[in-house]
Amino acid sequence: MKLFSLTTEHRYILKIALPAIAGLSTQMVVSLVDTAMVGRLPDAEYNLAAMGIGVFATWAVVSLFSSLATGTHVLIARSFGEKNDEGCGEILNTAIILSFLIGIVVACLVVFFSGDIAGFFAADKRVGVLAGDYLHYRFMGIPFFLITVSYRGFFFGIGKTKIFMYSGVLANLLNIIFNYIFIYGGFGIEGMGLAGAGLGSTVATICDAIFYFSVSLIPLYKNRFNYFKRFRFIKEIAQRIIKISLPVSLQNIFILIGFLSFIAITGLIGILEQAASNVIFSALLISLLPCFGFGIAVQTLV
């Protein structure tokens, strides 16, 4: 007797969810690899503690706007279900323009205040300086990251989560390579330590945006959705994207501020404790991947 059987609906959910989980998994693997790389630098406890602040501060800032993918995803899925291919293209165009403009403004602000942001959460001055250097380079990639967010919402909405999986594998493989080069040095480039991890991640993010743009040029998608035929910003669509995304953005930022506050509190106990918290959180996030993947599938189908 079978304990359960897979219906057509179950198979379709898995078809959408599994590539998304695979793509998310590559991000977590890179997080663990980055932690291992930074952990081999001199004064590893200071670098790991600073990296913990840097990573969660980056996620806190980015999560406030990366949820634009949720609004884009929901609207695209609805238009796609209605067989309104041109509408899908208009939503993508608006999302890309909106995300890039927001990304430029936010990046200019947070890059300038990166040292202050790091110093606010760091109990140790040296940790604050290291985290500030990391954030300075990491924040530069925000506009390009938000472009990938828009494309991600589009491909999620039309059920092509494999594109995200391919993107995750490529971008995060490049992330490991660039981080190794910029952290330790190589090919005539002097090692930058923890700051190199921020720069490497930003360069990989730019490559990821280029990958998504290249995929969007494939005739299978370009000719069907006509998003480059009339590349324009539609105010009404932007308002709908923001209306759907804003509650999710606030939820995400409060969760991540909670994590960031916890890491800041552990810094009051000691540098080693703060470094250990970063390592534990990096491993802990892996357990959440299946939930995120099935959430993407449900948003697409509903």
Image (spheres, helix red, strand yellow):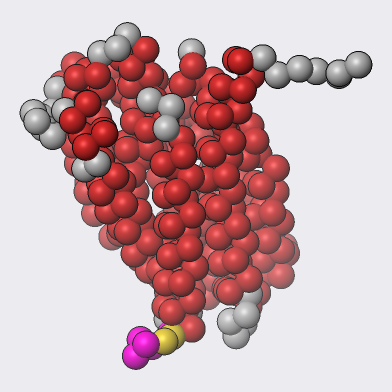
**Residue drawn at (43%, 79%) of the image:** 181
> Residue 271, position in %: x, y?
67, 69
Q: Which residues are magenta?
A: 187-191
> Residue 11, position in %: x, y?
61, 22
Q: Tally the numbered discs.
A: 0
> Residue 166, position in %: x, y?
45, 48
Residue farthest toward the right in the current orientation of the protein: 1
92 over 170 or under it: above or below? above
171 over 235 or under it: above or below? below
**Residue drawn at (37%, 12%) of the image:** 81
**Residue drawn at (76%, 17%) of the image:** 5
Left or right of 72: which side holds 49? right
The one of 285 and 126 positioned closer to us in this rendering? 285
Work out which quarter of the rendered image holds the N terminus and state it: top right
The quarter of the displayed image where residue 256 is located: top right
The one of 221 and 172 positioned closer to us in this rendering? 221
92 over 240 or under it: above or below? below
Magenta: main secondary structure: loop
Determine if residue 79 is in view.
yes
Left or right of 37: which side holds 115? left
> Residue 12, position in %: x, y?
56, 22
**Residue drawn at (37%, 87%) of the image:** 187
Left or right of 107: which side holds 156? right
The quarter of the displayed image where residue 278 is located: bottom right
Question: Would you say residue 53 sits in the magenta stretch?
Answer: no
Left or right of 111: which side holds 8? right
Residue farthest toward the bottom in the current orientation of the protein: 188
The quarter of the displayed image where residue 274 is located: bottom right
Determine if residue 139 is in view.
no
